[in-house]
Amino acid sequence: MNAGCRMGGEPTAVLHVGGMKAGSSALQYDLTWQPVRRSLDPASDGYEYVSLLPWQLLRGEALQQHAAHFAAHYSMSDQLASLVGQPAEGLVAGLAGLEAVRREGRVPILSYETWLTAQSAEVHAFTAALGGPIRVIAYVRPPVQWLASLYYQRDYTCEPIVGRFLSKWLFAARWADFLDVWHSAPGVETLDVRLHGGDICADFCQLLDCEVSGRRVQHNQTFPAEAIRLFERHQMPSEMSLSEAKFALWRWLPESVAASGLLAAAPFPFGERDIEMIMEQTGDASRRLLGLCDAETCSRIEADPRWWSVDPGHHVPPAARPVAADNASAAPGGDSDALAVALWQCLLAADAAWRQK
């Protein structure tokens, strides 16, 4: 199998094997609302974004109706565990939908936020069922920046202590460990490792040599510092998804409020020792990552100190404050906190109703 190069013929499917906080939501939104992309080469097949779910495949209008159930208005496929764990006839039904896409002269694109970190047995069962040749595309980020983005979203209300968070999630910043699994999976002919940047949608389409939608999509703005302080003082409702809350917050906030100092970005979570530990435990995986990248991506990773240096100056944004220095986070909020939580719950309910119209 070749890594990071163009396939000679058309693939059976293109799989975007997402990683959390690596641009999946933006890409899925862009593809959901313009799922059919013509190839820039008239002699080549185009592409169509679809969602593969147990017992069915969603495309076109059904895909967009499915997207209305999510705060970000995007649709994606299901977890690999769900897809390969269903009865055999369920997967056969989904694969029949993929074949219908191919008969119309388009290569299906499938995406899920955390396929990258799926279990090896699930990955191999899935690609074997699809049949080759398969093109796999994954986006990666420098370990410290990625973990900092993840910190305030993934299980933050359960793991607010940095040390416990890192003990739980640092393994996932070792990108090469997971890419090795996809590299060796049955039917995978091409693995493209890309660096997540400011416009994942344009990069993805340029890689496939197909139409770009023309819109710039950005999702997952960080929580403001005041929201983080609220979380630190109060156990938030168990049914509240942080992703849903974040989208609702930023969708409806007035621009003047969103731009104020009150809603400044959350402080940078890691200190010097944390950064040193992250780099020590991901350095070998980052070196192996180079062997899975094309020459241009290798050069960019090798030249970027965020992949190699323990110097906090390469990792901490200039205006950021470490969590430990944020003394205001422990201040009690009194009745105003209870009101804030109640208002946020109302906002979430209103946002869900708005999306169902």
Image (cartoon, rainbow, N blue to C red):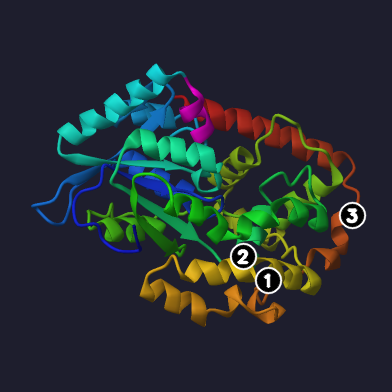
**Which image quadrant for residue 48?**
top left
Name the quadrant of the N terminus. Answer: bottom left
Q: Position of residue 84 (x, y in %)?
A: 47, 29
The span from disc 3 to disc 1 (Cα, nearest Å) is 30 Å
* Residue underneath mark 3: 330
**As drawn, is 212 to the left or to the right of 342?**
left
Residues 169 and 148: in front is 169
Question: Mark 1 sits on what residue?
Answer: 279
Say few, some or many: other residues with alpha carbon within 10 Å of mark 1 (under 14 / 14 to 19 / 20 or more): many
- Distance from Cα at disc 2 to Cα at disc 3: 28 Å
Which residue is under mark 2? 143
Measured from the top left, where is residue 92 in percent x and y? 34, 22
Q: Residues within 10 Å of mark 3 (few under 14, many from 20)?
A: few
- Is residue 73 visible in this depiction of the protein? no
Circle nearer the N terminus (3, 1): 1
Q: Residue at x 75, y 57 (%)?
A: 166
- CB within 8 Å, label 1 to label 2: yes
Task: Single out the mark in the foreground, 2 or 3.
Answer: 2
Number of the front mark, 3 or 1: 1
Give the extent of the magenta segment: 80-86
Magenta segment: does it hold 82? yes
The reply, left or right, for residue 339 in relation to residue 85 is right
Does the residue at mark 3 contact the one at mark 1 (Cβ under 8 Å)?
no
Judge whether residue 165 can be spotted in this image.
yes
